[in-house]
Image (cartoon, rainbow, N blue to C red):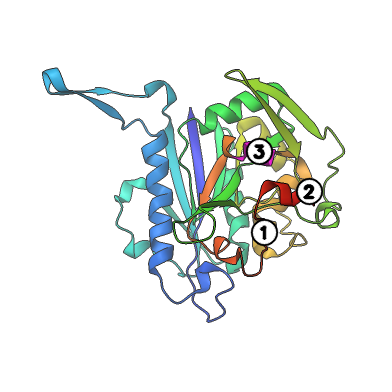
């Protein structure tokens, strides 16, 4: 299988610090991007082996789950950290643009569209997301075999920490229904149930399709690119960054996520602990499961 990953990467300190790409210290952004790209190769490339101790040889490993990868890092106006990245040059290609910084996700869509017909999967990630699941695309394939290509399964983003009140938090919980109501009808096919490895699993139309990423098979990418609103640069969902990442797929597909009790089925790490740090401060901590029903 051939997979194209596009990554929107920006580092432009401006003092506001609203997004991590705008903060003064470049090191966290550099570490996040490095982990992002390295993980894609470690999980999905053909460069995997097992050491056969008896004969002091290496043998190929996981080859039925490995793929041909192309990774394109999209930047804008020279505001990036690629010259400080400690990764082999062949790990990615650089696609410079002159786009408005918060609209960089639309430039990734241009790269995806211009590559139609050459890949089996077309993917977008913000630069602070890290995959850890080598079965990620196998799960996506399985889901689309059950639900069809007009249904899109999004991963849950999460953060982890050993210093906060909670060790792991999923950060894209439900929005108020009015936020996505102009763009999707969650009452249409609201739930899909299945069974995988003997375990029942439930997928629900999500009130928060945002995950800072998406992973489309070739049929899905072709369908989206054929829509009249593709690349219209509409920014009416939350903000420019969120719209560039999510609005187009929300308009085009029935977007699902697993129910919270099975959030780990398809997940992706958000680098850092920005959201975890809100728990106990701006976000109330529920002390026990029973407290939810009081």
* Mark 1 and mark 2: Cα distance apart in space: 32 Å
Q: Which mark is residue 184?
A: none
Residue 279 shows in the view: yes
Q: Which mark is residue 261?
A: 3
Whether 167 is among the magenta residues is: no
In what element is the residue under mark 2? helix
Q: Which residue is mark 2?
A: 293
> Residue 232 location in percent, x, y?
74, 56
> Residue 213 location in percent, x, y?
59, 48
Q: Main secondary structure of the magenta part?
A: helix
Circle 3 Cα neighbour tier, 10 Å, few/some/many (<14 / 14–19 / ≥20): few
Q: Which residue is mark 1?
A: 242
Seen from the viewer's position, the closer of residues 32 and 120 is 32
* Mark 1 and mark 3: Cα distance apart in space: 25 Å
> Is the residue under label 2 in contact with that under label 1 (CB below 8 Å)?
no
Seen from the viewer's position, the closer of residues 217 and 208 is 208
Relative to 16, say whether 284 is above or below.
above
Residue at image point 61% right, 24% down: 142
Earlier-in-chain disc, 1 versus 2? 1
Name the residue at the left extreme: 55
Residue at image point 54% right, 60% down: 165
Earlier-in-chain disc, 2 versus 3? 3
Range of the magenta residues? 259-263
> Is the residue under label 3 in contact with that under label 2 (CB below 8 Å)?
no
């Amino acid at each position: 299988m051939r997979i194209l990953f596009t990554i929107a990467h920006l580092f432009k300190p401006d003092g506001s610090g609203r997004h991590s790409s705008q903060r003064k210290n470049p090191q966290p952004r550099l570490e996040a991007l490095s982990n992002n790209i390295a993980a894609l190769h470690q999980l999905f490339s053909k460069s995997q082996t097992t050491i056969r101790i008896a004969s002091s040889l290496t043998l190929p490993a996981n080859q039925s789950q490995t793929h041909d990868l192309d990774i394109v890092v999209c930047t804008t106006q020279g505001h990036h950290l690629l010259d400080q990245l400690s990764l082999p040059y062949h790990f990615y290609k650089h696609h410079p643009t002159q786009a408005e910084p918060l609209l960089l996700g639309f430039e990734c869509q241009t790269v995806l569209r211009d590559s139609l017909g050459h890949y089996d999967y077309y993917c977008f990630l913000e630069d602070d997301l890290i995959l850890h699941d080598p079965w990620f695309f196998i799960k996506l394939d399985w889901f689309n075999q059950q639900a069809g290509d007009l249904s899109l399964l999004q991963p849950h983003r999460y953060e982890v920490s050993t210093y906060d009140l909670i060790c792991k938090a999923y950060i894209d919980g439900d929005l108020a229904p009015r936020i996505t109501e102009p763009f999707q009808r969650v009452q249409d096919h609201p739930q899909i149930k299945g069974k995988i490895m003997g375990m029942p699993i439930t997928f629900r139309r999500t009130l928060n399709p945002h995950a800072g990423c998406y992973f489309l098979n070739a049929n899905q990418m072709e369908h989206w690119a054929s829509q009249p609103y593709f690349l219209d640069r509409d920014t009416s969902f939350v903000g420019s960054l969120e719209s560039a990442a999510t609005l187009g797929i929300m308009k085009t597909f029935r977007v699902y996520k697993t129910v919270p009790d099975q959030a780990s089925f398809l997940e992706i790490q958000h680098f850092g602990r920005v959201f975890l740090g809100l728990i106990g401060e701006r976000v109330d901590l529920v002390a026990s499961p029973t407290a939810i029903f009081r």
